[in-house]
Image (spheres, helix red, strand yellow):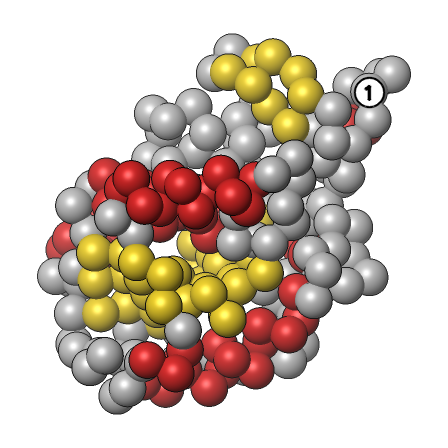
């Protein structure tokens, strides 16, 4: 697959807390880093996302006395999974993994900083109404094909890909550059949604400069 000047690589949440040993470590999460660093030079445009939570974020189980991580609660915008406290602003867990060397990245999009709304997608917070500004950034720069890599395949990567399609962008998830949490069948669920929405799942070997 030939990469063009209208393509962008979106690298999702390669942060210490999402890698093995982190507060919300994705199994084998650090194994995606060499794949991402290998394909990134094929792209003229690289954007990073960074989970950036306040310490009292409502998605943290610790913010709800008596609740435990991975329990579900009802909030104003629907059902919310409670997570271990992770990617807290200014902590080492929120920092990008030291092996992620992408000095050519032209933008870093921080998400999840509103204490009352969680944010999986790089395009919208979980209320499905509050935009992050990424769609406008891509539109103004005429970037219309999105290639997604990072963590986690079945949450932040997946939701971002689905929103890209909803916004009329082409979306390609680079499967070997992602890892999944797979909570309560979330991996199979997101792949079903990919099929419905027209999200393509490809291998990094299919990408050529």
Residue 113 spot, x, y in % from top left: 55, 38
Name the outermost residue toward the right: 66
Residue 91 spot, x, y in % from top left: 74, 54
Relative to residue 161, is residue 130 depicted above or below? above
Instruction: Answer with the quarter of the image where residue 30 lies.
Output: bottom right
Badge count: 1
Query: Mark 1 sits on what residue?
Result: 67
Residue sitting at 17 percent across and 59 percent down?
A: 144
The quadrant of the picture occupied by the N terminus is: bottom left
Q: Residues within 10 Å of mark 1 (few under 14, many from 20)?
A: some
Residue sitting at 72 percent across and 45 percent down?
A: 86
The quadrant of the picture occupied by the C terminus is: bottom left
Looking at the image, can residue 164 be seen?
no
Q: Is residue 53 left or right of residue 47?
A: right
Between 197 and 152, the one lying in front of the other is 197
Residue 167 spot, x, y in % from top left: 20, 42
Residue sitting at 21 percent across and 56 percent down?
A: 170
Looking at the image, can residue 80 be seen?
yes
Q: Is residue 140 left or right of residue 81?
A: left
Instruction: Answer with the quarter of the image where residue 43 lies.
Output: bottom left
Label 1 secondary element: loop
Residue 5 spot, x, y in % from top left: 16, 76
Relative to residue 190, is residue 72 depicted above or below? above
Residue sitting at 60 percent across and 12 percent down?
A: 74
Relative to residue 157, is residue 129 depicted above or below? above
């Amino acid at each position: 697959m030939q990469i063009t000047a209208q393509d962008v690589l979106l690298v999702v949440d390669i942060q210490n807390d999402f890698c093995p040993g982190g507060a919300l470590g994705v199994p084998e999460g650090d194994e995606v880093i060499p794949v991402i660093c290998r394909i990134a030079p094929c792209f003229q445009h690289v954007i990073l996302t960074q989970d950036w939570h306040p310490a009292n974020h409502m998605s943290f189980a610790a913010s709800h006395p008596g609740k435990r991580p991975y329990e579900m609660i009802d909030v104003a915008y629907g059902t919310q999974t409670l997570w271990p406290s992770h990617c807290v602003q200014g902590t080492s867990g929120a920092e990008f993994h030291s092996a992620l060397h992408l000095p050519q990245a032209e933008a870093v999009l921080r998400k999840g900083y509103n204490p009352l709304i969680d944010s999986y997608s790089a395009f919208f917070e979980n209320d499905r109404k509050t935009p992050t500004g990424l769609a406008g950034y891509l539109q103004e720069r005429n970037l219309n094909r999105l290639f997604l890599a990072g963590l986690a395949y079945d949450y932040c990567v997946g939701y971002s890909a689905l929103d890209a399609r909803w916004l009329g962008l082409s979306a390609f998830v680079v499967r070997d550059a992602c890892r999944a949490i797979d909570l309560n069948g979330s991996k199979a669920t997101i792949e079903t949604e990919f099929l419905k929405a027209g999200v393509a799942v490809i291998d990094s070997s299919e990408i050529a400069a």
